[in-house]
Amino acid sequence: MKISQKGLYALQAMMMLARHHHQGAIKIREIAYEEDLPEKFLELILLELKNARMVESVRGAKGGYQLRREPSDIPLSEIMRLIDGPVAPFADAEQLRVLIDRDLPHRALYQVFLDVRDAAAKILESTTLADLISGTTPRSTKGKRAAKKKEKGSVLPMVVGGQKNE
Amino acid sequence: MKISQKGLYALQAMMMLARHHHQGAIKIREIAYEEDLPEKFLELILLELKNARMVESVRGAKGGYQLRREPSDIPLSEIMRLIDGPVAPFADAEQLRVLIDRDLPHRALYQVFLDVRDAAAKILESTTLADLISGTTPRSTKGKRAAKKKEKGSVLPMVVGGQKNE
DNA sequence: GATAAAGTCTACTAACGTAATGGACTTTAT
DNA sequence: ATAAAGTCCATTACGTTAGTAGACTTTATC
């Protein structure tokens, strides 16, 4: 269940639309500007989201995009599955179940994959856009480290590409 | 944390070596045959596993590979991180923590990613090769569906490639 | 010490996926 | 009519993935 750059863009765009919910159609250009996304690429993403009926578009002058449902009705899993496919480390849940039934020598391995998928799905299906735009995330207020020193405004730190270390 | 074909091969090879632990060096050809893996590709994978000191090789005639540690000391996470990188849906745990600290508008999103990674890591770090080769997986005896009809021997079912549905 | 069986290492490649970009076309408000 | 906006299709640069090929080195055995 790797999240692609495109998937991240989709999530950002949807968060932006959630923040501006009930404010009418928002132009691609505004979304791109506010979230700092490549405009032309974002266009394709919004088209996919529209075809999946998660957003609706208004064409022509004064046009733009808006959510079709309340932010609290849109789980992250839905956006991520649309853009990046199954929320699982390998195959999808049904294929994993088939493998568990049929590939006896490796069934324990596939069961682990399924357990990981279930854990991920549980989180991503229960977190909605509304959870992301309110000040704090409801699940997991754990991991709170003592207050940080204030950083200067630079939003993004260094690279994020992802080598092999963790 | 998508698992590549190569990652799956590595896990299969390690499971095979675990099954034959304390039986001396196992030839690449035997591993490839027993697990039905492409021999030349497996060779590269075993080399990586050797460089990571998870297995050791014996060169020359009567050579082969064997585990350097007990199967119960080798968590799946270690193999998967080596081949496929961080066990996280986006970036790695440390980068996610930095983003949570610094990218205020998206911190809630990155916190969700971190939660997913923690859930996956917990499972993959606590499951070892020994768990996979004993008859049953210790965690998650849940999800037990009533006894299946016996299938004929065909091990792998149809495609597994992975479209967008789940 | 010749031979054969094994691992080692480097290089290469075909196919695919990702992250875009460009441009013509359609729709709509004014 | 015009301009602003979404729509749709084609193309591309680049990197990754999943291998393959072949020469080289090491070791057991006779």
Image: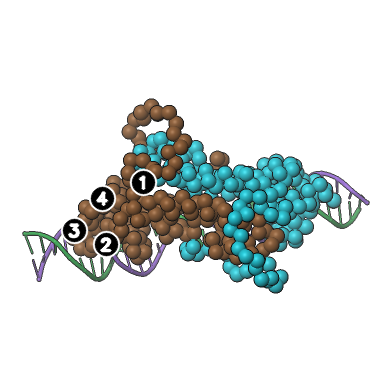
Chain colours: A cyan, B brown, C purple, D green
**Disc number for residue B20:** 4
Helix, strand or loop for disc 3: loop
> Do discs 4 and 3 share a chain?
yes
3 or 2: tag closer to the N-terminus: 2
Pointer 4: residues within 10 angstroms few (<14), some, or many (20+)? some
* Residue type at the position of mark 3: Lys
Tag on residue B57? 2
Q: Position of residue B70 (x, y in %)?
A: 30, 55
Q: Earlier in the sequence, mark 1 or mark 2?
A: 2
Q: Quadrant of residue B73?
A: bottom left
* Residue positioned 28% across, 48% down in the render: B19
Question: Of the residues under marks 4 and 3, which one precedes in the sequence?
Answer: 4
Closest to the camera, between mark 2 and mark 4, is 4
Q: Same chain for marks 3 and 2?
A: yes
Check disc 4 and report its element: helix, strand or loop: loop
Q: Chain of mark 2?
A: B
Give the residue at mark 1: B132
Q: Which amino acid type is marked by label 2? A: Ser
Identify the residue under disc 3: B62
Q: CA distance from mark 4 to mark 3?
A: 15 Å
**Of the two numbered discs 1 and 2 in the rendering, the one whose residue sits closer to the viewer:** 1
| Residue A75: image location, x then y, percent | 65, 45
Give the CA distance from mark 1 to mark 2. Answer: 23 Å
Q: Which mark is residue A161?
A: none
**Chain letter of the residue carrying label 4:** B
Mark 2 falls on what kind of element? strand
Q: Is residue B13 visible?
A: no
In which chain is the residue bearing label 3? B
Query: Label 2: few (<14), some or many (≥20) within 10 Å?
Result: some
CA gap between label 1 and label 4 equals 13 Å
Residue type beneath disc 1? Leu
For the residue marked with disc 4, what is the amino acid? His
